[in-house]
Image (tube, rainbow, N blue to C red):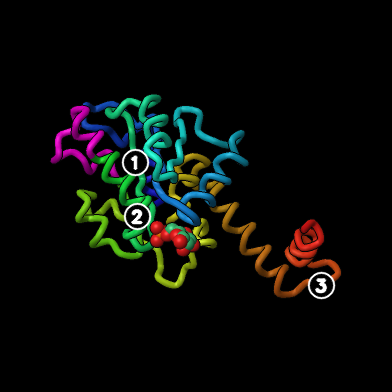
Amino acid sequence: MVAFADQVRRQQWLGHTGKPIQSIVNIGIGGSDLGPKMVCHALQPLGEPKLSMHFVSNVDGADLQQVLAQIDPATTLAIIVSKTFTTLETMTNAHSLRSWLLSHGVPEAKLGQHLVGVSADPARAIQLGIAPECVFKIWDWVGGRYSLWSAVGLSALLYIGPTHFSELLAGAAQMDQHFREAPLRRNLPTILALLARDGK
Ligand SMILES: O=P(O)(O)OC[C@H]1O[C@@H](O)[C@@H](O)[C@@H](O)[C@@H]1O
């Protein structure tokens, strides 16, 4: 995953006309959308300025159309993110985006340069035309709401780069440890949960 991200970030991963990737479109919903979207938004100052990031989750076609109007198929990389690869909203948007690429000049044989997948079920991703080596696997035991820390974080990795992404993972591991060990009075996730409860 890091080798792939490095290639894209160094402008060595080329689209079908030989141009480097400039736009990343993350297609997913729930945990396969919100985590990476939040990281890309929050860590924008660390983001790669040559990449524009887009997130499409809504099955209402207006969501996808707004993004398609801003990007060039020749320089677009779509990441279809779905643990199950059966989620209706994501599959609908994935098929629409695939059709858009094909109808805007991307030859079917070169679709693999513009489409990658993240899933616990790679066979389903391959059926969509994603090259087997471009399907990044999520472990089966990762729950959707925590999946940012798995391959679902690919768009965040592309945007902030491997060094910052490793720091993000290390910070999360540190917080896991803090949650297990810190006394409740100083336990940050516990305090946050209590504040949220009080806020209701
Ligand atoms: O990643 P997929 O399988 O498309 O699921 C997307 C989302 O679906 C929702 O119903 C929940 O289960 C979320 O936890 C999950 O992130």
Q: Which portion, as a residue range, is magenta?
A: 99-115
Q: Within the magenta stretch, is there residue 97?
A: no
- 65 to 144, vertically: above or below: above
In the picture of the structure, the residue carrying the numbered disc 1 is 78
Q: Three-letter amino acid code at disc 2?
A: Leu
Residues 22 and 36: in front is: 36
Residue 6: x and y in percent read 40, 42
- CB at disc 1 and ligand 1 closer than 8 Å: no
Residue 42: x and y in percent read 62, 41
- 100 to 59, vertically: above or below: above
Q: Three-letter amino acid code at disc 1?
A: Ala
Q: Are marks 2 and 3 in contact (CB under 8 Å)?
A: no
Residue 98: x and y in percent read 25, 41
Q: CA distance from mark 2 to mark 3?
A: 41 Å
Q: Within the magenta stretch, is there residue 114?
A: yes
Q: Quadrant of residue 8?
A: top left
User: Residue at 79% across / 64% down in the picture?
Assistant: 194
| Callout 2 secondary element | helix
User: Residue at 65% across / 67% down in the picture?
Assistant: 176
In the picture of the structure, the residue carrying the numbered disc 2 is 88
- CB at disc 3 and ligand 1 closer than 8 Å: no
Q: Is residue 150 visible?
A: no
Q: CA distance from mark 2 to mark 1?
A: 17 Å
Q: How busy is the neighbourhood of tag 2: few (under 14 within 10 Å), some, or many (20 plus)? A: few
Q: CA distance from mark 3 to mark 1?
A: 43 Å
Residues 191 and 160: in front is: 191
Residue 102: x and y in percent read 19, 34
Residue situated furthest right in the rendering: 185
Q: Quadrant of ligand 1?
A: bottom left
| Callout 1 secondary element | strand
In the picture of the structure, the residue carrying the numbered disc 3 is 184
